[in-house]
Amino acid sequence: MKLRLTDSTLPFEKALRELGHVWDVSLGADGVPVFWEQSGNQLVVRKNEQGEVLIKGSRKVHFFRGLSLLSEHISEPEILIEETPAFRNLGASFDLSRNAVMTPKALFRMFCRAALMGYTEIYLYMEDTYQLEQYPFFGYLRGAFSKEELKCLDAQACELGLELIPCIQTLGHLERFLHWESSAELQDTPDVLLAGEEKTYCLIEAMLKNCRECFSARKIHVGMDEAMNLGLGRYLKKNGFQSSFSIMLEHVKRVRELAHRFGFEPMMWSDMYFRCASPNNDYYEDHIEIPQWVLESAPEDVALVYWDYYHPQKEFYERYIRLHQQFRAPLCFAGGMWTWLGPAIDYDVFFRNAQPALYACLENGVQDIILTTWGDDGGETSPQAMLLGFQAYAEFCYRQTLDEEWLNRRLKACTKADGQALRMISGFNKTPQMSADSDLPNGAKFLLYQDPLLGIYDLDIESMGFAQQYRRLEQEFAKKRQEHDEWETLYLFYELLARVLKNKAELGIDLYRNYHAGKTQAFCMLADQALQASEDCTALLDAWRDLWEKECRPFGFEVLEGRIAWVISRLKSTARKARQYGQGEISRIEELEPERTLVLRKEGTKCMHGVYFWKQIVSTSKAF
């Protein structure tokens, strides 16, 4: 799409030239003349009989969404598109702390796509992945961003009309920094800072000072979620017992004052306020009343972020929104894209929960929305696989719909990605034979990493059709890869993941059943199957590395490389023992002797749940 700038669109020239590296847009005297008018709350794209295009909107970023809408209809003689955003702010959050630290170049690509979708905010979730001069072990060998890189990202976001917001941690979730010996005096428990300690506030001051120097945004997210054992570690030894809530209140006060000193408007996750009112220390309760003293304790100028990724019922979100609205503080809602199950994002669960959550926000006056993409346990999901979820939140904001056909068309216009292909990724986690009520199964992860001789989860998946499912997925992604588009690396990764799993998913079941049936003749064939899976794992690792290097810094990939090396080694050990047994060199395989038991589902049901941490999957012995 070639455009000709006018006086009103000249300020966009730099951004458009940069956008041209990511999206099909160019500038030239023979291009379509485009005018921009900043006014009103509606986004309007109008093309008249003379071929002139007017884009109107209240935010700079609306110009870029307008361009993506224009690109779908550029050949039409006249155009009139009108959209009214349902929310004041729409934010996309990137987890840059669970090993997968995106490169500045990859983040800029995401900024461009987010602008074309119509996002207004980008949150960079950085626990310790930004450099602090006074703290050399903060982000050490973790791919931490320099000041220069963050300043450049901030400038790039501003050019696109995006507000780039630091999302940091000032209490919990700092285990990777706190595990260093030099951080011992700052540690309460392994992942929680020592509240009340002046050196802790020197650290937080350094965090905020660094963010102020790098980011132009007024907002800052200071975290403070899931500090479960606050006050029960070194704090307890130093100060005696105090309730975690009273400790947190004082800490929030100190952090708030520091944030204001640097000109920030802080926001924080809301769960610690709810946990103090819960008899079970939970965030989500079917029946909960927030005490008045808790409501009054929360500062009215620290916005609360209600995060909820789990509920399919609109009524639950509505009740929790109303509970949050009892506080005097501004409210923001954060949904989740279900990127944390392993290498395969679960779009089925995402869409199931996103629609009721967004309608609840729309109908109950919530004006600020964030979509999070957590990478728990190693950042195994590629950012490339996340685009459909981002597009979904954007289309709901501007069109109040999650219609699949519309969504896929808009995704193609903004990113060139194939929505149907991305939706297929959910098939790695579950099969049609499983109950629809299954609780967030993640077969792609636990079947990739589980030991074939131990077969910890074999009985859970028996007769569930996983091997057949992976054969189908291998074929589907091979077809997509043969289209040779810019997503070929992503399709290859999922093709190879399916190839590994079609041979490995039910290998342990076959070993166990044949062993106990006395069918020794089957074991040489099963040994070959294990060796084939190990060879396929080598190819998978290469594809995973290529995919990682397109988006992320190298730090952290050593973890995934070690995990796949573990799988390869155990498959080779399985092949060796199976062949020895099949050829009569050994008389028994001790790992196959114990009777298998159900772990992830109950007897007589097809309702399965998942297991999310590598160290819990690979062995029943202590792994790490």
Image (cartoon, rainbow, N blue to C red):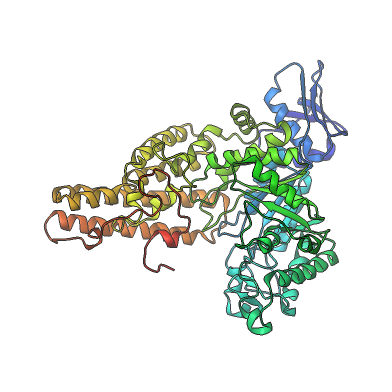
Quadrant in which the C terminus appears: bottom left
Q: Is residue 458 visible?
A: yes
Residue 124, position in %: x, y?
A: 68, 55
In this orientation, does residue 27 appear?
A: no
User: Whole-percent x and y of residue 143?
Assistant: 60, 62
- Count of labels in the image: 0
> Which quadrant of the structure image shows residue 288?
bottom right
The correct choice, above or below, for 494 with respect to 623 in the image is above
Residue farthest along the left direction in this orientation: 584
Q: Is residue 483 left or right of residue 3?
A: left
In the picture provided, is 600 more to the left or to the right than 353? left
Q: Where residue 168 appears, x then y in whole percent?
A: 69, 61
State the image quarter where residue 202 is shown: bottom right
- Residue at (78% x, 53% y) in the render: 326
In the rendered image, the quadrant that contains the N terminus is: top right
Q: Residue furthest bottom?
A: 238
**Camera-side residue of 264 and 190:** 190
Please provide percent x and percent y for residue 3: 76, 29
Residue 597, by quadrant, is bottom left
Residue pictured at 58% horizontal, 43% vertical: 386
